[in-house]
Amino acid sequence: MKTQTIIFALATVIFAAPALADHNKTSWLFWKEGHWTEVTEDGDVFEGHYVNGERLGPWSARFAVGFVVECLYVKDKDCNWVIRYADGGVEEGPLVDGKKHGHWVLRWADGDVHEGPYVGGKRHGHWVLRGANGGVEEGPFVDGKRHGHWVLRLADGSVVEGPFVDDKRHGHWVLRLADGSVVEGPFVDDKRHGNWVVRYPDGTVKHKTWRNGKRIN
């Protein structure tokens, strides 16, 4: 569900029920006007008001696959969405020109909550990801990918931090465990690569060498 894409498009509209004829009307300029109910070939149902041919005010969409969308249009293609999935997940935020744009809150059915900005339909800017297990992960997205310094705080008090490059760990990472141990070293292309150091609370220090994600000593 988390990766599910919602396409709000009415390429082919079928007016299936005769009862729709009393409100699905057009003006003398052939603009849609007033209350409309639109049913797609897939069985998705869209309902709301048109003014001068553009959606305006509250709309609802009931998708055949089991989720519901509520949308308050400020002009056609621009609205504030509430998306309710059949499993209990909810997404809320604005659309601009038909794409997610601005601050969104995503509450998944498993209890995870993701919050941050979209730009042109992609995550872009500082995001906070709260896990149902108590962990919190935060850092920047650039053009839909993690890019920059990220920090993960686990429920047990451990902290993991380091840089992402194009959605992959790349550069120096540090893991501070709740027991006081520290593990640090480089990632290359999302794999441990190079010399890693483990420092224990009693002062013991160990060195480990990794190549392309495999430990060689």
Image (cartoon, rainbow, N blue to C red):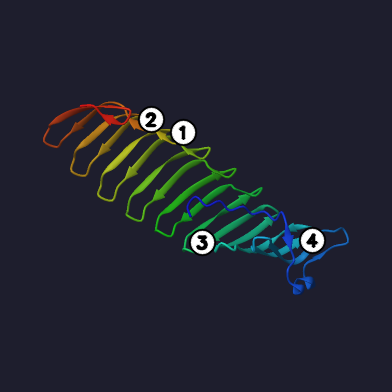
- Residue beneath the point at 70% across and 54% down: 75
Q: Residues within 10 Å of mark 3 (few under 14, many from 20)?
A: some
Which residue position is annotated with label 4?
32
- Residue beneath the point at 47% across and 63% down: 87
Mark 3 and mark 4 in contact? Answer it, CB < 8 Å.
no
For marks 1 and 2, give the CA distance: 9 Å
Q: Position of residue 4 (x, y in %)?
A: 52, 52
Q: Quadrant of residue 200?
A: top left
Mark 1 and mark 3 in contact? Answer it, CB < 8 Å.
no
Of all residues, the one furthest to the left in this rendering is 202
Q: Residues within 10 Å of mark 4 (few under 14, many from 20)?
A: some
Q: Earlier in the sequence, mark 3 or mark 4?
A: 4
Identify the element where label 3 is drawn. loop
Q: Residues within 10 Å of mark 1 (few under 14, many from 20)?
A: some
Identify the disc placed on residue 166: 1
Which residue position is annotated with label 2?
170
Which corner quadrant holds the C terminus?
top left
Residues 100 and 8: in front is 8
Q: Earlier in the sequence, mark 4 or mark 2?
A: 4
Identify the disc placed on residue 85: 3
Q: Position of residue 173 (x, y in %)?
A: 31, 33
